[in-house]
Amino acid sequence: MPQTIHIRVEGRVQGVGFRGWMTVLADELGLNGWVRNRRDGSVEACVRGDTDAVANLLSLCHEGPCAARVDRVIHEQSAETVASGFEQRPTI
C-alpha cells in the first residue's frame, strides 16, 4: 500500500552529496517525490511509494551518505500530491 511522508534531516547534510544520494536511492527503490536543501542547513524531502520502500529510505536517512553527519531525522505522514519520478528541487 502506498504512503507519503515528509522528511527533514538535520546535521551536516549539505555539501556532502545528500540530495544526490537520496535521489539515486529513491530511484532504486521505485519511489516518487522530491528533495531539497533548506537555508537553515537541513535537507527536506517528500517521498511516496510502497510502505516497505519508504521505510527503507527513511531508515537509511539516519545514516546518509558517507560524508554526512546526521543528528536528527523528523518525519510525518503527508497528504501532499507527489508527481511521478524523483527530483532535486532548488533550496528554499
Image (cartoon, rainbow, N blue to C red):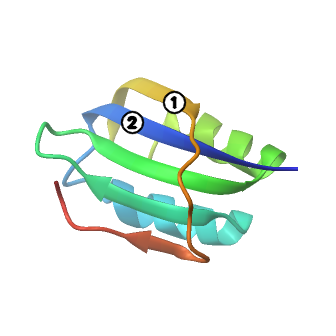
First along the sequence among labels 2 and 1: 2
Query: Closer to the camera, 65 or 26?
Result: 26
The location of residue 67, given as percent across then percent down, is: 32, 46
Q: Amino acid at mark 2?
A: Arg
Furthest-bottom residue in view? Answer: 85
Q: Which residue is mark 1?
A: 75
Q: Which mark is residue 5?
A: none
Question: Which of the 4 image quadrants contains residue 64?
Answer: top left
Of the 4 image quadrants, the one containing the C terminus is: bottom left
Furthest-left residue in view? Answer: 39
The location of residue 60, given as percent across then percent down, is: 59, 41
- The structure residue drawn at horizontal position 21% and vertical position 67%, both measured from the top left corner, is 90
Query: Closer to the camera, 77 or 44?
Result: 77
Number of numbered callouts drawn: 2
Position of 85 with respect to 34 (left or right) is right
Position of 43 with respect to 4 (left or right) is left
Position of 53 with respect to 33 (left or right) is right
- The structure residue drawn at horizontal position 63% and vertical position 35%, both measured from the top left corner, is 59
Residue 89 lies, with reference to residue 43, above or below; the image says below
Q: Which mark is residue 8?
A: 2
Binning the other alpha carbons within 10 Å of mark 1 as few (below 14), some (14 to 19) or many (20 upward) gives some
Q: Is residue 73 in view?
A: yes
Query: Closer to the camera, 85 or 15?
Result: 85
Residue 22 lies, with reference to residue 73, above or below; the image says below
Q: Secondary structure at mark 2?
A: strand
Dots 2 and 1: beta carbons under 8 Å? yes
Q: Amino acid at mark 1?
A: His
The location of residue 5, given as percent across then percent down, is: 59, 42
The location of residue 16, given as percent across then percent down, is: 26, 53
- The structure residue drawn at horizontal position 57% and vertical position 53%, both measured from the top left corner, is 47
> Gap in Å between the C-alphas at discs 2 and 1?
6 Å
Binning the other alpha carbons within 10 Å of mark 2 as few (below 14), some (14 to 19) or many (20 upward) gives some
